[in-house]
């Protein structure tokens, strides 16, 4: 019997490694740019085409490579950073496993031009699917130019499962931001389809954050600086007022590497809890320096999840540091214990105001089982009789209609068929009395449902009611938001927004949908764009639904608003005309039915 175990070929082994390292175009960008950073580049230019499907090019002015090193760089487990096992516990640079370039060249066509300062001529390599096709001397600048073309050309199944260009570009920008935020001393430029998205000159950290996310963030950044024997913390946190429901900028870095850490994130949010509304999340850009021997960066293939040896102690340090940053800034009001505050307390003088003991009055004639009651009880009874009288259906309701209402299987159809009157309770709920129970309706959620259906219908039919603004507002978007915006402009126009492109990622808001007169238009538009970005932008319909829902929630009546009888009737009629009256578009319950049987059970239990 012949042997059945054999070694994989290098080409197949590289493709398997690529499955872990190269998941999408953003993975290629990450590996190439991190290599350029490790090569001491001072300026890195990135060119992307078709969201990385056809081209990812990284140009740097770093150290470059010799002819031999250029060829060796594409071999598996080739690295300049590890010479012994001990080196694994002292890694402070980025890529070090030696699989990135071998994995990239296994699933793409790659060209490399590189030259060192001391060499007169550089080296040109052309590789495809792990095979070297060409190598020759070439005249080129000091540094390296990596060009990755036709990603996954030899693995159609992998290429098929790439997301839309908008989603893949969003992932590329996310990786780009993570790298540039930890290397502010390096200049970066990113262009997509020959349009420059980012041009970031070398700068300090605060200026780099502002250059990436917009000038409006600058005044909301609070410095954070703490040094202990376990960890050194630096960076910025946002002021409590800059917190938001979605789209907050949240970044952790350790030893110059981006990381995700839910435990440390909880420390930051815990520090902010007393100062921000429930559901809001803060901005933060936090940099940690620790002994490399106390962390493990290899617990996840992408090295974004990192295990710390002293997590609990660092958690406490981080919590205290964020609290201190918020407190020192004066971003929240403090208590002044030094200033004397006089509280007027009336002095007690014996005999001046004799105390009168409370008197208890008992009605000896009260009989709870008597049909005839005293005047006091009759008044109370009369009050409740009047209350229930108001809840009764209109007397014009015929006997046949009432019977049909009570026997209908669909409770929503009951209200529609019988035209019952609802009343408002605590300016939050609507209550309708049925012959067999009660309807409870959340008035705000009901309005959200109605508005969502209304806006969706307008967009479908390309109808809009726009009110021109007397003083147009200017809204500025980040480069990442500006990329998504063109896919939303058509729907914004259908909703009633009149926008003019001013260039440089800024727009003028000339008109807005009716009902948004008292809303901050710029913040609202940015919120809708952030919500659309959260959907992944893979399906245009999903983005449209997200923006419509944001608009509906903004315009819907707030809790606590009293409604007139006419408004209540109009709202309930519109709700039950909806195809989905029971739930809001995001799945929250609108209607609760309490039948007689359930009420009887509750009283029997008591």
Image (spheres, helix red, strand yellow):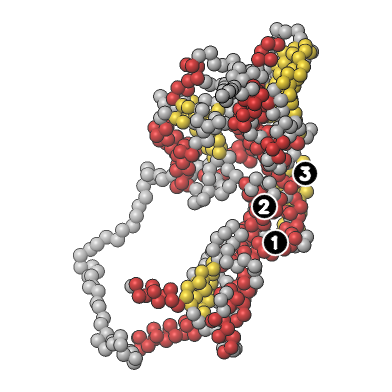
Q: Is residue 115 above or below residue 342?
A: above
User: Which element type, helix, strand or loop, lies under badge 2?
Assistant: helix
Quadrant showing the C terminus:
bottom left
**Residue in the image at 35% along x and 52% along y:** 342
Q: Is residue 218 above or below residue 135?
A: below
Does the image show residue 560?
Answer: yes
Q: Residue 487 versus residue 529: which sits nearer the camera?
A: 487
Q: Which residue is the extreme one toward the bottom?
A: 372
In x, y percent, where is residue 420? 58, 80
- Mark 1 and mark 2: Cα distance apart in space: 14 Å
Q: Residue 16 versus residue 393: which sits nearer the camera?
A: 16
**Residue in the image at 47% along x and 73% along y:** 594
User: Which element type, helix, strand or loop, lies under badge 3?
Assistant: strand
In terms of image quadrants, where is residue 464? bottom right
Q: Which residue is mark 1?
A: 455
- Mark 3 and mark 1: Cα distance apart in space: 27 Å
Asked if disc 3 and disc 1 are in contact, CB closer than 8 Å, the reply is no
Label 1 environment density (alpha carbons within 10 Å; few <14, some 14–19, many ≥20): many
Q: Is residue 14 above or below residue 464?
A: above
Does the image show residue 569?
Answer: no
Q: Which residue is mark 3?
A: 502
In terms of image quadrants, where is residue 105? top right
In x, y percent, where is residue 151? 72, 31
Q: Mark 1 or mark 3, which is nearer the start of the sequence?
A: 1
In x, y percent, where is residue 36? 65, 21
Q: Residue 132 versus residue 81: which sits nearer the camera?
A: 132
Left or right of residue 493: residue 184: left
Front label number (3 vs 1)? 1
Front label number (3 vs 2)? 2
Q: Mark 2 or mark 3, which is nearer the start of the sequence?
A: 3
**Residue in the image at 46% along x and 38% along y:** 263
**Residue in the image at 57% along x and 72% along y:** 563
């Amino acid at each position: 019997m012949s042997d059945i175990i054999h070694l994989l070929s290098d080409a197949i082994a590289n493709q398997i490694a690529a499955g872990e390292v190269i998941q999408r175009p953003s993975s290629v960008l990450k590996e190439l740019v991190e290599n350029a950073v490790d090569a001491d580049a001072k300026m890195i230019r990135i060119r992307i085409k078709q969201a990385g499907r056809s081209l990812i090019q990284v140009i740097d002015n770093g150290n470059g490579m010799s002819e031999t090193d250029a060829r060796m760089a594409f071999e598996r487990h080739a690295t300049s950073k590890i010479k012994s096992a001990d080196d694994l516990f002292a890694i402070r640079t980025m890529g070090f496993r030696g699989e990135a370039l071998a994995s990239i060249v296994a699933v793409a066509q790659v060209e490399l031009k590189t030259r060192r300062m001391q060499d007169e001529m550089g080296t040109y390599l052309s590789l495809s699917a792990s095979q070297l096709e060409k190598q020759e001397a070439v005249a080129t600048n000091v540094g390296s130019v990596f060009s990755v073309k036709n990603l996954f050309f030899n693995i159609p199944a992998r290429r098929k499962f790439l997301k839309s260009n908008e989603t893949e570009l969003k992932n590329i920008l996310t990786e780009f931001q993570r790298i540039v935020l930890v290397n502010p001393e390096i200049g970066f430029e990113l262009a997509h389809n020959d349009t420059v998205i980012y041009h970031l000159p070398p700068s300090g950290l605060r200026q780099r954050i502002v250059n990436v996310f917009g000038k409006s963030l600058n005044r909301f950044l609070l410095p954070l600086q703490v040094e202990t024997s376990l960890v050194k913390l630096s960076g910025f946190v946002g002021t409590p007022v800059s917190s938001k429901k979605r789209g907050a900028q949240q970044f952790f870095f350790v030893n110059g590497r981006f990381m995700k850490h839910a435990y440390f994130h909880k420390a930051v949010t815990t520090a902010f809890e007393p100062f921000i509304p429930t559901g809001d999340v803060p901005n933060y850009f936090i940099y940690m320096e620790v002994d490399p021997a106390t962390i493990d960066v290899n617990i996840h293939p992408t090295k974004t999840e990192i295990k710390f040896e002293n997590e609990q102690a660092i958690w406490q340090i981080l919590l205290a540091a964020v609290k201190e940053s918020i407190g020192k800034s004066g971003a929240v009001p403090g208590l002044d214990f030094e200033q004397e505050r006089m509280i007027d307390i009336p002095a007690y003088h014996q005999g001046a105001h004799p105390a009168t003991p409370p008197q208890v009055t008992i009605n000896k004639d009260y009989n709870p089982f008597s049909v005839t009651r005293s005047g006091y009880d009759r008044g109370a009874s009369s009050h409740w009789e009047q209350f229930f009288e108001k809840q009764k259906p209109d007397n014009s309701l015929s006997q046949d209609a009432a019977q049909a209402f009570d026997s209908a299987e669909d409770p929503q159809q009951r209200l529609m068929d019988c035209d019952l009157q609802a009343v408002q309770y605590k300016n939050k709920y609507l209550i309708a009395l049925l012959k067999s129970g009660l309807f409870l309706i959340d008035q705000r959620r009901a309005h959200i449902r109605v508005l969502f259906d209304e806006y969706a219908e307008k967009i479908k039919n390309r109808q809009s009611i726009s009110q021109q603004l007397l003083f147009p507002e200017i809204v500025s978007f980040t480069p990442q938001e500006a990329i998504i915006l063109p896919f939303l402009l058509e729907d914004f126009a259908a909703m009633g927004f009149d926008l003019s492109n001013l260039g440089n990622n800024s727009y003028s808001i000339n008109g807005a949908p009716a009902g948004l007169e008292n809303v901050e238009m710029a913040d609202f538009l940015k919120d809708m764009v952030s919500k659309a970005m959260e959907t992944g932008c893979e399906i245009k319909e999903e983005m449209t639904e997200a923006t419509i829902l944001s608009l509906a929630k903004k315009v819907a009546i707030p809790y606590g608003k009293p409604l007139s009888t006419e408004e209540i009737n109009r709202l309930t009629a519109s709700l039950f005309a909806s195809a989905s009256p029971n739930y809001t578009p995001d799945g929250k319950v609108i209607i609760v039915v309490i039948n007689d049987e359930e009420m009887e059970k509750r009283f029997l239990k008591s």
